Image (spheres, helix red, strand yellow):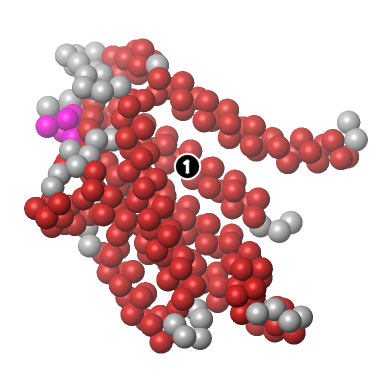
Amino acid sequence: MNRSSESAVSKFLPWIALAAAVGVFLFLVFNMSVWESLLTALFPDAEEVIYPRANLAQLSGEHMILVAVSSLAAVIVAIPLGVFVTRKRGRGFKGIVSDLGSLSQTIPPVAVLALAVPAIGFGFKPTVIALFLYSILPILRNTIAGLEEVSPVVKEAAMGMGMTHTQLLFKVELPLAAPVIFTGVRISLVVNVGTATIGAVVGAGGLGNPIISGLIRDNPAFVLEGAITAALLAVLIDQIIGRIEKSLTPG
């Protein structure tokens, strides 16, 4: 095998491994017999070891929708805000925006749910609002940090080549800041996967359902079923975003 072939293999090997991990996860959520065997071995005295109201494939799908919608909303809001406060016009708002981002992180999602449910009802909407507020800070901070780390020399050189401020932002600053921004998105997503389990409290579904049911019924098998799946999902998302992040890093 020549050097170019080895380089191509080494380039695609992490993606192949990641695809295999996704396949293993899908196999686990679509094959409840595996869980039944495992949980029966761990809890032989339990009357039920599998959450009866929905299978893991359905619960994982609901969970991922909660995470995807709230995280996408956080990205759409946090990145433009981070760009705005690093521009000349928005620097005066940097402190206020950062403080609001920090405040959104300090409010417990359960408290947001308690306030939102009387206003908009149970289910999907209040959970997405709580997760959205909890997801903003890492993306906002990393967007600001990434843009501020771009060398002034690089920006001056780009302006010297005749770039406008808009071209400078999209062709120089954002591409150079992209790895740092993706790190913020990665942190936000992983935290969001774990936090989204609270949605079960207000009927939003997801992997929190077996966890809450297990706590109510004193059934650790249900808790473990939901918790392990949520943890595996968080690790998988972390690896996917991490791989994308590495692909954006020069060299």
Query: Circle 1 — which element?
Result: helix
- List the residue tagged with mark 1: 237
Could you tell me which residue is drawn at 53 percent across and 43 percent down? 239
Could you tell me which residue is drawn at 71 percent across and 37 percent down? 12
Which x, y percent locates residue 244?
Answer: 59, 48
Q: Does the image show residue 173?
A: no
- Foreground pick, 179 / 156: 156
Q: Image quadrant of residue 91?
A: bottom left
Magenta-drawn stretch, dominant element (helix, strand or loop): helix
- Foreground pick, 200 / 1: 200
> In this picture, which residue range is highlighted in magenta?
212-216
Mark 1 closeness class: few <14, some 14–19, many ≥20 residues within 10 Å: some
Residue 9, relative to residue 29: is it above or below? below
Quadrant where the C terminus is found in the figure = bottom right
Q: Amino acid at mark 1?
A: Ile
Residue 199, relative to residue 150: is it above or below? above
Residue 215 shown in magenta: yes
The residue sitting at the right extreme is: 2
Residue 149, relative to residue 49: is it above or below? below
Task: Please indicate whether residue 1 sits to the left or right of residue 219 in the image.
Answer: right
Could you tell me which residue is drawn at 21 percent across and 50 percent down? 126
